[in-house]
Image: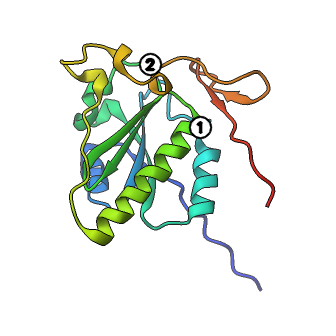
């Protein structure tokens, strides 16, 4: 008789400050989908995250969803209606991607994972970032790179959309193996 396969959890569900603090202690890169309770996490990126997880298979890559309404460390994201992905390494924010742009998310994950591997192998400090949307010096989101500004992206027929917000995920082209 064949044994049942254990289902692997793709995203860690963070719903309290305690779980948030535990998650920040994980070794490796943590990609956090910060969401509001009323709209839930972005379902459109789950397939992208699954694809990346299957291709990379790294024990240093973690995905999480975090409800900003119940986590004090994410209170600055409350009341905003936009997908935001926070990248943490060593308990520090190392990158932010605003909006659901699959190619940018994939590139950022791969770049940050490479930097994290190098940092762990060779030592040294990771560059820490401040989310410029909340920076007093920058003032507003206009200072964000175009790829991180909010708004729908993608072309008809090449994207999937979220039914709760106006974001679209351009589907990456898959090369045949």
Q: Position of residue 154 (x, y in %)?
A: 67, 24
Mark 1 Cα within 10 Å, few/some/many (few <14, many 20+)?
many
Q: Which residue lies at the image location 32% right of the left edge and 61% below the top edge?
A: 26
Color encoding of the figure? rainbow
Apparent side of residue 69 relative to residue 125 in the rendered image (left or right)? right
- Does residue 6 sit above or below 126 in this rendering? below
Which element is circle 1 on?
helix
Q: Which residue lies at the image location 26% right of the left edge and 38% below the top edge?
A: 129
Q: How many marks?
A: 2
Apparent side of residue 92 relative to residue 154 in the rendered image (left or right)? left
Residue 81: give its label: 2
Q: Which residue lies at the image location 33% right of the left edge and 29% below the top edge?
A: 69
- Does residue 56 sit above or below 82 in this rendering? below
Furthest residue toward left: 136
Q: Which residue is mark 1?
A: 102
Apparent side of residue 50 relative to residue 157 in the rendered image (left or right)? left
Residue 27 in sight in this render:
no
Q: Nearer the viewer, mark 2 or mark 1?
A: 1
Nearer-N-terminus badge (2/1): 2
Q: Position of residue 120 (x, y in %)?
A: 30, 67
Q: Quadrant of the N terminus?
A: bottom right
Cα–Cα gap, marks 2 and 1: 19 Å
């Amino acid at each position: 008789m064949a044994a049942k396969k254990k289902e692997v959890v793709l995203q860690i569900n963070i719903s309290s400050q305690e779980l948030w603090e535990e998650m920040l202690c994980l070794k490796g890169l943590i990609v956090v989908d910060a969401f509001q309770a009323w709209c839930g996490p972005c379902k459109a990126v789950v397939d992208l995250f699954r694809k990346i997880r299957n291709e990379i298979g790294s024990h240093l890559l973690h995905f999480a969803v975090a409800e900003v309404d119940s986590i004090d460390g994410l209170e600055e994201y409350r009341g905003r209606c936009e997908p935001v992905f926070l990248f943490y390494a060593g308990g520090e924010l190392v990158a932010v991607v605003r909006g659901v742009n699959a190619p940018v998310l994939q590139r950022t994950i791969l770049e940050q994972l490479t930097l994290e591997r190098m940092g762990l192998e060779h030592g040294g400090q990771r560059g820490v970032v401040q989310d410029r949307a909340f920076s007093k010096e920058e003032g507003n989101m206009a200072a964000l790179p175009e790829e991180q500004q909010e708004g729908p992206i993608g072309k008809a027929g090449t994207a999937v959309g979220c039914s709760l917000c106006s974001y679209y995920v351009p589907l990456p082209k898959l090369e045949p193996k």
